Image: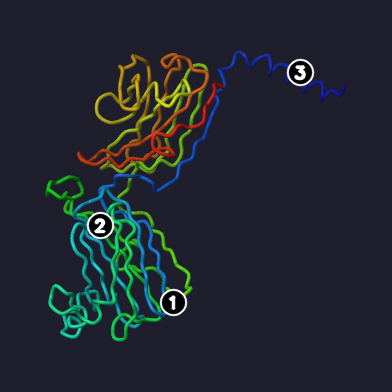
């Protein structure tokens, strides 16, 4: 045996002999989560818009998420003239109320007699010749999403060979009973695309089989730190460590992370750990069901809730406190609870869905 091989053999033997003296190795798991899936947001969060442009119609369908805000205002600006500033038509809608079309010029309502004569709705007397070209449909039973606005082309109305749109929304911070429910001030707005006076790209007119163009919303000014991106788990003979990776937490937001533990492979959690929120920073509870607490577990559970600008919340649970399970499954949720009457929440995967079993390392 060469000197090099003999040295390697001795080194390997020494390494194996030392392993029992090292800390127990943890079994680790990295669990990804989809982005932009927080539910219960207290404003109309525009997510995408689709445009289909043919010789006969302009069809715009936009999607949004919200807490079913009862008094939200939405609108779509249509621009079909490359030589003029701003849109030619704005279609507005107020939730639990009516929709109406508004001719535009230089980003302002066109109050000329000719424009009013074309776009007057039935409530103002005889409907104008152009208002009849607009059809509005919305899925009111599912938070008003999706909403579709179809404009039939008619000479003297909206007839451009290219079109681009801007979708907007606004919530004034009050619910249907005019009870103030958020901390954002007078209103929270969103636009697609983001920015001031922005539009999607131009969509040219095609034949009857024209393909639909889709545009997705970018990052909003209202940040929901509770959007989980991934969860890391380390399980060994002494502790279970969970790291929840989420979006950056702004200074004005408050919330907590919930970690549910299943140790016997049934459908219900046996424990729930909480990090952040009111009271103790970290808490471990024994559970009967998802919603029924048995008691608090006196245990040296530790955790660190994300501070301003941070993107991770952590918890470390001694496995002796949860019965020293050989395997464990977890379910994770984050809650933003800055406001009293809404809880923007995200789950790892589906709501109350368990991860795969993670054995001890």
Front label number (3 vs 1)? 1
Which numbered disc covers residue 10? 3
Which of 212/182 is in front? 212
Earlier residue among tags 2 and 1: 2
Q: Residue at x 51, y 23 (%)?
A: 235
**What is the basis of the colouring in this image?**
rainbow
State the image quarter where residue 190 is shown: bottom left
Q: Position of residue 153 (x, y in %)?
A: 34, 80
Give the position of the C terminus as an image quadrant.
top right
Determine whether 193 is above or below 102 in the image: above
In the image, residue 228 above or below residue 21: below
Observer-nearest of 217 and 132: 132
Residue 189 is tagged as: 2
| Left or right: where 33 falls relative to 144 | right
For the residue pair 48 and 226, the one nearer the viewer reads as 48
State the separation of the CA atoms marked 3 and 1.
Answer: 73 Å
* Residue 327 drawn above or below residue 138: above
Q: Secondary structure at mark 3?
A: helix
Q: Secondary structure at mark 1?
A: strand
Q: In the rendered image, which residue does mark 1 sit on? A: 204
Q: CA distance from mark 2 to mark 3?
A: 68 Å
Residue 292, x across and y down, in percent: 30, 23
Would you call the spot at circle 2 few (<14 residues within 10 Å), some (14-19), or many (20 or more)? some
């Amino acid at each position: 045996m060469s000197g090099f091989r003999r040295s390697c053999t001795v080194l390997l033997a020494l390494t194996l002999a030392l392993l029992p003296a090292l800390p127990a190795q943890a079994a680790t798991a990295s669990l990804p989560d989809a982005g932009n899936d927080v539910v219960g947001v207290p404003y109309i969060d525009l997510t995408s818009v689709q445009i289909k442009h043919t010789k006969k119609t302009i069809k715009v369908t936009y999607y949004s998420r919200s807490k079913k805000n009862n008094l939200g205002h939405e609108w779509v600006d249509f621009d079909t003239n490359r030589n003029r500033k701003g849109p030619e038509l704005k279609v507005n809608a107020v939730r639990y109320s009516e929709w109406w079309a508004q001719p535009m010029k230089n980003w302002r309502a066109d109050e000329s007699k000719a424009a009013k004569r074309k776009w007057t709705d039935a409530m103002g007397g005889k409907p104008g010749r152009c208002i009849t070209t607009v059809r509005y449909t919305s899925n009111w039973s599912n938070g008003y999403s999706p909403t579709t606005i179809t404009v039939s082309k008619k000479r003297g109305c909206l007839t451009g060979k290219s079109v681009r749109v801007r979708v907007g929304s606004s919530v004034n911070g009050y619910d249907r009973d005019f009870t103030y429910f958020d901390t954002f001030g007078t209103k929270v707005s969103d636009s697609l695309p983001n920015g001031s006076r922005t539009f999607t790209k131009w969509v040219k007119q095609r034949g009857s089989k024209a393909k639909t163009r889709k545009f997705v919303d970018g990052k909003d000014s209202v940040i929901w730190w509770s959007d989980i991106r991934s969860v890391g788990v380390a399980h060994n003979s002494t502790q279970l460590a969970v790291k929840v990776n989420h979006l950056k937490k702004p200074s004005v937001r408050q919330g907590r992370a919930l970690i549910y533990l299943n140790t016997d492979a049934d459908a219900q959690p046996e424990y729930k750990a909480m990090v952040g929120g009111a009271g103790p920073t970290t808490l471990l509870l024994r559970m009967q069901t998802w919603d029924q607490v048995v008691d608090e577990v006196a245990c040296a559970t530790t955790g660190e809730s994300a501070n301003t600008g941070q993107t991770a919340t952590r918890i470390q649970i001694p496995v002796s406190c949860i019965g020293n399970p050989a395997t464990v499954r977890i379910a994770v949720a984050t809650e933003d609870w800055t406001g009293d009457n809404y809880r923007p929440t995200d789950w790892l995967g589906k709501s109350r869905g368990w991860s795969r079993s993670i054995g001890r390392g």
